[in-house]
Amino acid sequence: MPVAIVLINTEIGSETEVFNALKSIEGIKEVYETYGMYDIVAIVEAQSHDVIRDIIINKIRKLPHVKSTTTMIVVEHSRIS
């Protein structure tokens, strides 16, 4: 199943609001509020790259207070317990 890592910048002071909104979007499997260059990191997993694209463009980017996103499409991954 395709996976993408989405790095998100928010408006100052709105990190928690965006973080909570992301948790309710289908296809987002993990969300991290972070310090540094990006405010939030989201892991998106879906049936196809087209579905991932739709989630990013029509759901994540359209959330209030999201300033920008950078997406990395995962080529290969392994879940380590």
Image (tube, rainbow, N blue to C red):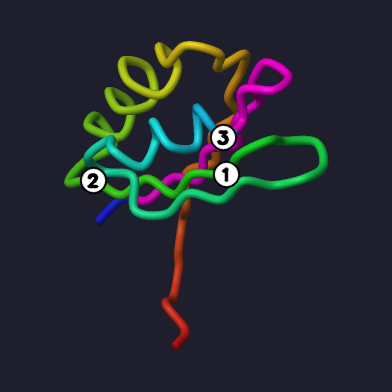
- Indicate yes or no whether the magenta region holds residue 77: no
Nearer to the camera, 63 or 53: 63
Q: Residue at x 58, y 24 (%)?
A: 69
Crowding around mark 2 (Cα neighbors within 10 Å: few <14, some 14 to 19, many 20+) is some
Which mark, by number, is residue 46? 2
Q: Is residue 54 left or right of residue 11?
A: left
Q: Which residues are magenta?
A: 3-15
Which mark, by number, is residue 70? none
Which residue is denoted by mark 3 in the rendering? Answer: 16
Q: Is residue 52 left or right of residue 39?
A: left
Which residue is denoted by mark 1 in the rendering? Answer: 41
Mark 3 vs 2, N-terminal side: 3
Nearer to the camera, 50 or 21: 21
Q: Residue at x 52, y 38 (%)?
A: 6
Residue 8 in the image: above or below residue 10: below
Task: Check disc 1 and give the amino acid type.
Answer: Val
Of badges 3 and 2, nearer the viewer stands 3
